[in-house]
Amino acid sequence: MSTLTDSAPWQALIEHQAHLSEQSIRGLFAENPQRFSQFSLEAGDLLLDYSKNLCDAQTLNLLDALATKAQLAKAIDAMFAGERINTTEDRPALHIALRSPDRDTEYGQLVHQTLDQMESFVNRVTSWQWQGYTGSPITDVVNIGIGGSDLGPAMVYSALANYQLDGIRCHFVSNVDPAHIEQILESLDPATTLFVIASKTFTTMETMLNAQTARRWLLDACSDEKALAKHFVAVSANVELARDFGIGNNNIFPLWDWVGGRYSLWSAIGLPVALGIGMENFRALLAGAHTMDKHFRTAPFKENMPVLMGLLECWTLNFCGAESRAILPYSQLLHLFPAFLQQLDMESLGKSVTQNGSAVDTASGAIVWGSAGTNGQHSFHQLLHQGTHLVPADFIAIATSDSPNLEQHQQLLANCFAQSQALMDGKTLDEARAELIQQGLSEEKASTLAPHKVIAGNRPSNTLILKALTPQALGSLIACYEHKVYTQSVILGINAFDQWGVELGKVLSTDIFAELAGVGETSKFDGSTNALINRCKR
Ligand code: F6P
């Protein structure tokens, strides 16, 4: 047992769960008419309803004690103070500095200089002063990046579709599969296309190969290397490599090692977003995140949205038997949000050792998955309702819509709320049988069919409501999840800011690539890998 699982709050939570498991969430509502007001809170433009979790006041007391024992307050201060909390890479994790209005700190100066550089560039492009090699303005921006250099900007750009500027479209290429870039370039004109090569390291294989393909595509059209300066900009912490690629100093936007890839959308990695929605809206996104940062830093744990979400995730994973979390945005514009959260959550919390190198003997992070509602209702929700896995869900709803089609928006909300209600309430055998009899079935037929209609219920969920899908609200929502992840990492004692696990596959693929590209059959690897390579070569 580790000091965490051995601790008094952890042991008390085990006992508490045994007691609480005799209850149901539905029963807790019946007992306490004030449950919603006690188990919900607002921060910025967000409302979190966590009343549909199997938890009571004592659960919160014990989780609060667990957070205190883990010195969460100290860890939050350490992050904001710029301490080197990313210990394995010996760096701070200062994404919070990227959205702070404070210019007067060492980091603030760098951040605001870069925002100003972005602003002047965005203004030149969007006012058509920046022209391509034929003198035409830019109509299409292609971001080439992967992981944190793709998922965040792509998700935000898509979520803020209602803020997109006329005259500029953004596209996102990430996959090394040539089909991805080819499909996008097919419809574009080299003379009016701007590429943003987004890579913190400027060594990521997928991004480098796609960038070379884009470069060839442009040069095939104009045969003039000088044109590169008009069509390529880079965002990177590795200025030297960006320069070696042929990008001029003025076209390189800096990034710093104290910004993790999956936390970088607030930096110049957000350049395609700023080009697509304008700098004012990009700054509003930052302001929304900053609002959540202040809340996270100052609110007591029991009134702190990200802390509560992190503690409840720890509760469902470690004490209630859950393994995954479904992210269910009831908003088509947020359809990329689950994919973005997958990297944020799973790359941060997918760890097996603690900061001091000892084994993690608890559940680390959840398997995060999901898709936009209502589509999921017609595919995987069946398993959520009647499968044998306990899958907690985060429902994300937008209270208002920009669409004049009020009826469809209300249907969307109705379905969102119905799903969390159904997950909680379920349907008993008696209820199922009575329903069937009422529909005219005989006693015998009703009894045969009823077990198939039973829905266990008691499945936990959170519901987050945004007043509107504005840049501010979206900024707060993303920051809320970032801090939820940090909270969990502090409780578990792990480093949320490294990702050593992704390295092995990268190294192995280099050797495999050499064999695939080489002559003859290979016998260099295990039987399966050899056979797969040789089969493809044949
Ligand atoms: O391989 C994983 C990873 O390092 C992510 O953490 C990162 O977001 C992504 O690759 C892209 O890295 P880069 O921005 O350096 O190209």
Image (cartoon, rainbow, N blue to C red):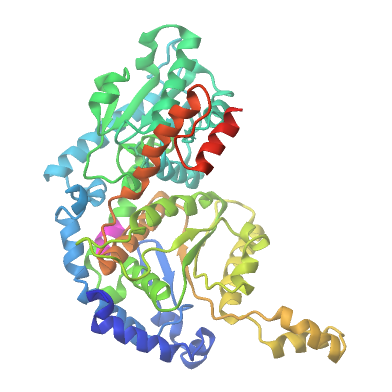
* Residue located farthest toward the top when viewing the structure as drawn: 223
Horizontal side of 102 relative to 501 (left or right) equals: left
| 224 up-or-down from 448: above or below | above
Q: Residue sitting at 50 percent across and 84 percent down?
A: 25
Pinpoint residue 310: horizontal percent, then vertical percent: 35, 68
Q: Specify the quadrant of the image occupied by residue 229.
A: top left
Q: Main secondary structure of the magenta part?
A: helix
Q: Residue sitting at 42 percent across and 91 percent down?
A: 19
Front in this rendered view, residue 322 or 262: 322
User: Can residue 410 be spotted in the picture?
Assistant: yes
Horizontal side of 106 relative to 294 (left or right) equals: left
Start and end of the magenta stretch? 291-296
Pinpoint residue 317: horizontal percent, then vertical percent: 41, 72
In which quadrant will I find the C terminus? Answer: top right
| 203 up-or-down from 60: above or below | above
Q: Specify the quadrant of the image occupied by residue 227.
A: top left
User: Can residue 139 be spotted in the picture?
Assistant: no
Horizontal side of 143 relative to 528 (left or right) equals: left
